[in-house]
């Protein structure tokens, strides 16, 4: 069992394990050949591991040359639980709160109520992934959790709502702005988002959704730019390369206002015979923003 997890600093996480059997299990699931290096599938960069003992407790330290992120901590917790290393609800909630307060989390929106984060939301391929953080909501079986699911599932036209273990997924088919409004309405109704947090939270969700859409369109336009030179769409290379460059810059600097300004400027020079598969990329992002 995992006794405690502490974020000592932005590049040091300490995990306390109850006994040597837990330590052996940890080494088995977190490492491959070298017990002092975390498996490369767990983190985007190398993570070193050191082992210590303190008052009979086995202590594992995860160290990174760069900062850990909120996502890294979530990943550690998920990996421990997935492989049967029990983590008490109180430890999960405490660790997520510490990660929220300490580590980089720019691709995550947090719904705050009564001064504490209750849920976090990510956006991927038009899907809002809603995950509980507070101890009472971790299993989604609290009154607030049940109310949230019931409220989200009451909408049938704009999105589908599915629950997988302790995660809620809202898969949007159309009207993403309306979907954001409905998610926020459901969180407030469930007392999982304070009314005074609504404006800031809505803007964050809008930014995440725009960035997600930009990634989707960037992937699509890059594919067109890789077509053979004799492909009909390559006749419009000046436009497609322009879109790719603008979206590449946006992904790097995340300045959506500047990206939209550039897309509008590019759009003004697009000829009427440009295929819809190309112009829809500009239209989607401009209208979305």
Image (cartoon, helix red, strand yellow):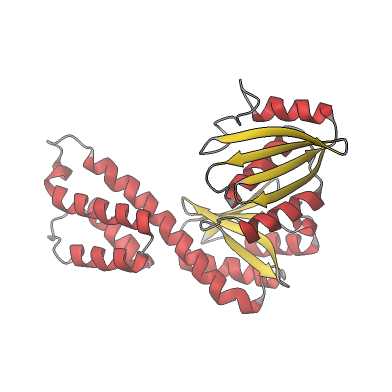
- Residue found at x 63% / y 42%: 75
x 13%, y 56%: residue: 273
> Can I make out residue 37 in this image?
yes
In the image, residue 177 sits, relative to residue 245, either above or below, namely: below
Q: Position of residue 77 (x, y in %)?
A: 69, 43
Quarter of the rendering occupied by the N terminus: top right
**Which quarter of the figure has residue 108?**
bottom right
* The image quarter in which residue 94 lies: bottom right
Q: Residue furthest bottom?
A: 196
Return the residue nearer the eye: 96 or 171.
96
Residue 56, how many percent across, how many down? 88, 35
The vertical placement of 32 against 255, above or below, is above
In the rendered structure, the answer to whether residue 104 lies left or right of residue 99 reads left
Residue in the picture at 51% in, 66% down: 204
Q: In screen coordinates, is 219 left or right of 168?
A: left
Image quarter of the C terminus: bottom left
Percent x, y of residue 49: 65, 33
171 vs 79, left or right, is left
Residue under the point 32% across and 46% down: 220
Q: Is residue 132 visible?
A: no
Of 40 and 129, nearer the camera is: 40
| Front-lying residue, 114 or 288 | 114
Residue 216 lies, with reference to residue 230, above or below; the image says below
Residue 170 figure quarter: bottom right
**Residue 272 x, y percent position in the rendering:** 13, 61
């Amino acid at each position: 069992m995992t006794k405690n997890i502490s974020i000592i600093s932005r590049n040091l996480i300490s995990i306390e394990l109850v006994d040597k059997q837990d330590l052996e299990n940890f080494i088995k699931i977190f490492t491959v050949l070298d017990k002092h290096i975390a498996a490369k599938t767990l983190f985007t960069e190398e993570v070193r591991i050191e082992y210590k003992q303190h008052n009979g407790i086995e202590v594992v330290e995860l160290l990174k040359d760069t900062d850990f992120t909120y996502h890294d901590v979530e990943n550690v917790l998920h990996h421990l639980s997935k492989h049967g290393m029990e983590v008490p609800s109180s430890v999960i909630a405490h660790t997520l709160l510490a990660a929220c307060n300490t580590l980089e989390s720019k691709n995550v929106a947090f719904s705050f109520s009564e001064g504490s984060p209750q849920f976090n939301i990510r956006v991927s391929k038009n899907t809002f992934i809603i995950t509980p953080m507070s101890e009472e909501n971790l299993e989604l079986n609290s009154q607030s959790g049940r109310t949230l699911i019931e409220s989200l599932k009451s909408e049938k036209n704009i999105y589908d709502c599915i629950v997988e273990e302790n995660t809620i997924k809202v898969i949007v088919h159309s009207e993403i702005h309306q979907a954001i409004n409905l998610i926020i309405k459901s969180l407030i109704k469930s007392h999982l988002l304070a009314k005074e947090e609504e404006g800031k939270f809505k803007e964050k969700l809008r930014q995440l959704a725009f960035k997600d859409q930009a990634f989707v369109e960037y992937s699509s336009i890059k594919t067109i730019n890789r077509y053979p030179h004799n492909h009909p769409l390559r006749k419009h290379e000046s436009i497609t390369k322009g879109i790719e460059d603008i979206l590449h810059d946006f992904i790097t600097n995340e300045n959506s206002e500047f990206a939209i300004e550039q897309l509008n400027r590019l759009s003004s020079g697009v000829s009427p015979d440009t295929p819809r598969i190309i112009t829809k990329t500009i239209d989607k992002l401009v209208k979305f923003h």
